Amino acid sequence: MPLRYGAAALVDLDLAGLLGALSIATDLGAGSPSGTSMRTCLVATCIADHLAVPDHQRSAIYFAGLLRHLGCTAFAHEAAELAGDDHDLIRTFEAVDSASKRKVLGRAIGSLAKGSGAGKRAKAIAKVLTTPSAGRRLAAAQCDQASALARDLGFGEAVATALAQMYERHDGKGDPHRLEGDAISLEARVVHAAQVIEALHRRGDRASTLDAIHARRGHQLAPDACDAAIAAGDALWRALASETPHEDVLAVRRISGPRTSLADVALAFGRFADLKTPHAVGHSPAVSALAADAGRRAGLDDGEVEQLRLAGLLHDLGSVSVGNQIWDRQGPLGVTGWEQVRLHAYHTERILSLSTVTRPLAALAGSHHERLDGSGYPRGRRDVSRAERILAAADEYAALVEDRPYRAALAPADAAKVLVDDATTGKLCRDAVASVLAAAGQPLAPAKRVLPAGLTEREAEVLGLVARGLASKEIAVALDIATRTVKHHIEHVYAKTGVSTRAAAALYAARHDLVAPASGPRPNDP
């Protein structure tokens, strides 16, 4: 019997367990080991306990620690362009003292692009070291996205502010706003210390971690947070060495979270996954709406339709495990790249199976690339349920009418023909294809839009193309206007919407349904 999710509210430990499971997706997106965010949460809570903060601050610290990687997809596209591999860039400079040019240089030379050939490695190191603004732009993008998505999850200002300030330093040399001392919220000071301590311990041992805490006290890290961490003693080391972080996160008491629905959580994490690469912005909500409508047309009951809607939002959660050097590739993928792509659906299923709340969705969400003839992945299954057949067809149609780095979007009629051909050859279910194509039928003439933030129609068009990752010159060609005019529009859009980065603009466009519809060839296509 399908679970009824629609109006269900998740509070306290139910929400904690759900976000604990979903935090594994954020770890994968940052290229960190599974459990990194949960151990950061445990360390942050341990520090909060020794600071004897009130319960409401302790809860904010707990959830901010758990969500510390929620912005990691914000700069992935730019990071891959800069260093070749977004995961590698984040891993390389994790916990390094960014105020020390010597340590940054040493970490770059010692770690960056180690798996690449000598030429590519030298190029990546040179590009990173000669782009000093990259660190601040990465921090700004990650902080903006994490803070915004935390609000989408129902969290208040304390959690949102902690995530917006999680890269600020006690000495004022942090990013993105160079805040100093008590100008940084207590929650942010604790979470920043926790994430640095967790990374230091993972890269070293107890002695080296203690030495680093002492050395960074009053510089990178707040003295009160460092003193509390040291005073915690064995409790700190147990948190850092936890081999069962999900269970340990659930065991933390006196935690209260916001009242929020699974639908809100699924939408926020669907957007988190889509924002990893510009061409995917808006993909998961599109699949969700299409699959749910098709399910209704196919005669599924309300519970099954709701499961399709939620699974559609979460189906690409595992895509963050794949580096942008693969997702953004314009040519064919090699064997290694394809193997990583094939595994993203497995990661989706595995992550969702870790929470009792999302476990009923796991197999459905992870099945979106399975095919009736066994040619799909990750398992090559033939025993595909009716709901799984609908989700697979909805995902394929939605992807076909979107631009991809290796091809332009197909017109709806051409995408429909591909689905019909796949049904004819036995890859997709005929009935599922019929339901999906009926749900994606010719749209009625749209009513005039009421745009947010006082945006004009032209500004909304520009914002939608920015969200798709087009540069100013490409937007100018696409809209047949001057590049200078495009830049003026972008300035107005940023001022009206209050964003300051491409990643934040993409998130704003996704949240307000302003992502540019996929269209014909890109401006530089022949």
Image (spheres, rainbow, N blue to C red):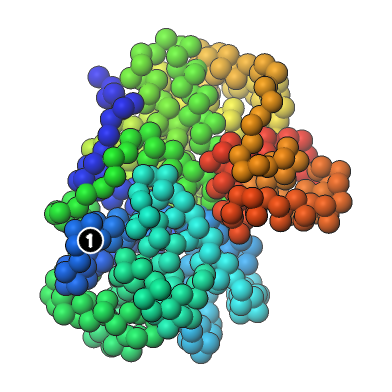
Left or right of residue 127: residue 367: left
Left or right of residue 90: residue 61: left
- Nearest to the observer: residue 66 or residue 118: 66
Q: Please give the name of the residue rendered at 68% of the width and 22% of the height, measured from the top-left corner.
A: 446
Q: Name the quadrant of the C terminus.
A: top right
- Nearest to the observer: residue 126 or residue 160: 160
Q: Quadrant of residue 439?
A: top right
Q: Crowding at label 1, few (<14), some or many (≥20) Cα neighbours within 10 Å?
A: many
Q: Secondary structure at mark 1?
A: helix
Identity of the amino acid at label 1? Arg
Q: Please give the name of the residue rendered at 64% of the width and 75% of the height, measured from the top-left corner.
A: 131
Vertical position of residue 118 compared to residue 312: above or below = below
Vertical position of residue 355 compared to residue 98: above or below = above
Residue, disc 1: 58
Q: Position of residue 129 (x, y in %)?
A: 61, 79
Left or right of residue 154: residue 440: right
Q: Please give the name of the residue rendered at 26% of the width and 66% of the height, measured from the top-left corner.
A: 44
- Nearest to the observer: residue 438 or residue 259: 259
Q: Position of residue 355 (x, y in %)?
A: 26, 41
Vertical position of residue 250 compared to residue 168: above or below = above
Vertical position of residue 491 compared to residue 509: above or below = below
Q: Position of residue 348 (x, y in %)?
A: 39, 42
- Nearest to the observer: residue 111 or residue 95: 95
